[in-house]
Amino acid sequence: MIPKATLRKALNDPGLLGTSLEGESWHAWRTLLLAIMGEALTDAELVTFQRLTGRDAAPLERVEEFVGVIGRRGGKSRAMGVLGAYIAALCDHSSKLAAGERGLVLLIAPDQKQSRVLLGYVEGALRSSPRSHPGPNTRNALSQQRHRHRGPRRQLQAAPRRYQRRHYRR
């Protein structure tokens, strides 16, 4: 993965992802995302990173796994949605993909309701970015990527409550 722009540049540029996590209330998440991607932190960000993680130094390269203990309404889905949008739209993965292969960014949620919320955050981050916007029908573009080879185009939707997991026990 080769970034076309640093995450810091993307989060500071209104033409990229700059409107996705703006404001002082998102400072901690911006700091954590920069650390996750292995980008150098400013002195203020390093203080925030140390306060949140208890570590003395920030990682010097992209981390393999991030584990956070974050309560409800802590901004997890929105922050991870923005990170997913960055990795999908502003990083080059061609060195890992075969010619013609389409890459996927996997964002996992505990249930379909939360996955709809997460997909909405990715869609919102991309729609607010004039330079990385994939087109007029972002949700279909995002959710149908994996269905192209299976026939007619479909839109990812959550199953009605009556069809959720308890009805599929065998």
Image (tube, grey):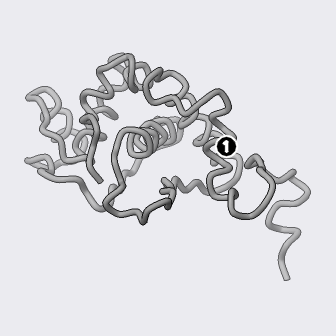
The structure residue drawn at horizontal position 36% and vertical position 51%, both measured from the top left corner, is 68
Residue 9: x %, y % from top left: 25, 27
Q: Report the front residue among 77 and 134.
A: 134
Q: As drawn, is 2 to the left or to the right of 46?
A: right
Q: Position of residue 30 (x, y in %)?
A: 31, 32
State the residue in front, 165 or 154: 154
Q: From the image, which quarter does the N terminus lie in?
A: bottom left
Q: Given the current orientation, which residue lies at the most extreme bottom position?
A: 170
> How far from the left and from the top, in percent, is residue 107?
52, 53
Q: Which residue is painted at 19% across and 47% down in the image?
A: 38
Report the side of 73 relative to 10 (left or right): right
Horizontally, is 108 left or right of 158 in the view?
left
**Among the 4 quarters of the image, the one containing residue 141:** top right
Under circle 1, the secondary element is: helix
For badge 1, the amino acid type reads: Arg
Q: 126 and 99: which one is in front? A: 99
Q: Position of residue 2 (x, y in %)?
A: 26, 49
Looking at the image, how many numbered discs can be counted on the residues? 1
- Image position of 158 (left or right of 42): right
What residue is at 14 percent from the left and 35 percent from the top?
A: 41
Question: Of all residues shown, which one is farthest toward the front?
Answer: 99
Question: Disc 1 marks which residue?
Answer: 116
Residue at image coords 27%, 43%:
3
